[in-house]
Amino acid sequence: MRIGVLGGGQLGRMLALAGIPYGHEFVFLEPGGEAVRGLGELIAASADDRGALERLTEGTDVVTYEFENVPVSAARVTASRVPLHPPAEALHYAQDRVNEKTFFRELGIPTARFVPVELRGDLDKAAGSLGLPAMLKTRRFGYDGKGQRVLRVPADLGAAWAHLAGTPLVLEAFVPFTRELSILGVRDRDGATAFYPLVENVHRDGILRRSVAPAPGLTPALQALAETHMQRVFERLRYVGVLAIELFQVGDELVANEMAPRVHNSGHWTIDGAATSQFENHVRAITGWPLGPTTVTGAVGMVNLIGRIPDPNAVLAVPNARLHLYGKEPKPGRKVGHVTVVAESHDALARPLAALERLAQG
Ligand code: AMP
C-alpha cells in the first residue's frame, strides 16, 4: 500500500523503517525532511499548503500523521479524500490543553485541576483558587517543556505572565507525583486493541531523557487502570493506530497529563524490546492488518540523544546496546537519536543504562 504521512521527522522515519518490510511505500509531507531522506517520496511543503495536501492523497491508500500540530482543517481535508488514521478529532483534543483535560474528565480520567487564563487578572484568580506551586502553560503548541513556567511563590506570577502572555494560557495545579509514566496502546480498524506495559519516564528541562519498560515495580492493578483509561479514549474517538497517554503516578492513582495521538518517544524501546514495535503496530492498524503481540522481551531502557551524537564505538561497546540515529544535524535541544538496551532484569539493566546515560550527556 501507499501510506501518506503528515510530517517527516524521526517518527516518520521509524514508521517507514517498520512498514517497508511489508512492501508499503511512503510519501511524506514535510518542509525539511532530512530524517526521511531515501525512505520514500518527499513533498517539501507544510500541512497548510492545499495543493501539497492534494498531492499527498493522490494515489495514496491511507494517510497518518506523526506530529500533533497538524492543523485540524488540513486533517479534515485529507480525511475527505482518503482514510485518515488516527481521526482528525484526536488532534482537536490533543492540540489544546483545556480541550484535552476537559475530554479526559468527561471520560472519568483524572487530571490536574486547571483554570483557563486569558487576562492578567485571571492569573491572580486562578493562582488563588488552585494555590501554589502551579504550572502556567500555553494552551497550544507546547512541547518538550516549551511554553511553560513553574509558579512557586506569588512573586513568580509577573515574570511568568511576561514570558507567556499573548496567547491563551492555562494554569494547572502542581501534581505531587511519585513518578512519571506513559501508556502506549494500539487499536485496529475492527476495534481490537493491544497495550504495552506502562513505561517509567524521566524528563529534564521538560524533555524526555530516559524511559524504562516495564516501569519498575509495575503492578497488574496499575496496568489495568491505565488500560481502562486508554480504552475509554479509544472507544470515544473510534480511534485507529497507536496512542500514548502521559501520566503522573500519585500513590496508586494515575493522573493524565496529556495524550499524543501518534507513535511516541516513550515507546521507542519497543523496536528492540517488544515482540512488535509501536511503529509496526501503527502501520498494521492503519492498513487494516492484524495487530502484533506487545510482549516485552526483558527489562528495557531507552536513552534519548539530545543535541549531540556520542561516539558510536563507545555506545556499541555497552553490551546489548542498540544505536538509532535519525539523520539529523545536531543542534542544542534537538533529538538526534536514541539508544536502547535490553537486559534480563531491572537489576541487570541498571549498569548498562547508567553507562549509556553518561555517554548521552557527554
Ligand atoms: P508537559 O509539557 O505538559 O508534558 O510537561 C512537561 C513536564 O513538566 C512533565 O513531564 C512534568 O515533569 C512537568 N509537569 C507538567 N505539568 C505538571 C503538573 N501539573 N504538575 C507537576 N509537574 C508537571
Image (cartoon, helix red, strand yellow):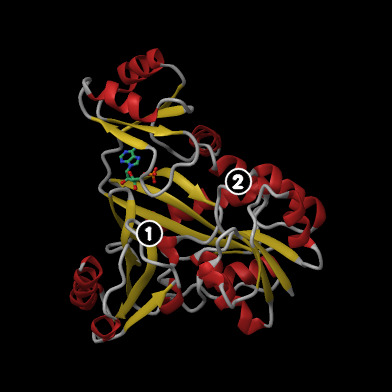
Question: Up-down: is 127 above or below 94?
Answer: above
Q: Residue at x 47, y 60 (%)?
A: 264
Which of the two residues, 260 or 360, is positioned nearer the viewer here? 360
Q: Earlier in the sequence, mark 1 or mark 2?
A: 2
* SS at badge 1: loop
Which residue matches tag 2? 91
Left or right: 266 with respect to 3?
Answer: left
Question: Image check: 135 left or right of 290?
Answer: left
Q: Amino acid at mark 1?
A: Arg
Residue positioned 55% across, 77% down in the render: 17
Q: Quadrant of residue 193?
A: bottom right
Q: Quadrant of the C terminus?
A: bottom left
**284, 41: nearer the viewer:** 41
The image shows residue 311 at horizontal and vertical percentages of 26, 79
156 to the left or right of 331: left
Placement of the N terminus among the 4 image quadrants: bottom right
Q: Quadrant of residue 160?
A: top left
Ligand 1 within 8 Å of the CB at mark 1: no
Residue positioned 38% across, 34% down in the render: 112
Estimate the x, y position of residue 327 in percent, counting from the top left: 45, 73
Q: Is residue 236 visible?
A: no
Q: Quadrant of ligand 1?
A: top left
Q: Is residue 163 above or below residue 89?
A: above
Q: CA distance from mark 1 to mark 2?
A: 23 Å
Q: Amino acid at mark 2?
A: Leu
Query: Label 1 belongs to which residue?
Result: 334
Q: Which mark is residue 283?
A: none
Residue at the image position 18 percent from the left and 76 percent from the top: 351
Badge 1 crowding class, 10 Å Cα cut-off, few under 14, some 14 to 19, many 20 or more, is some
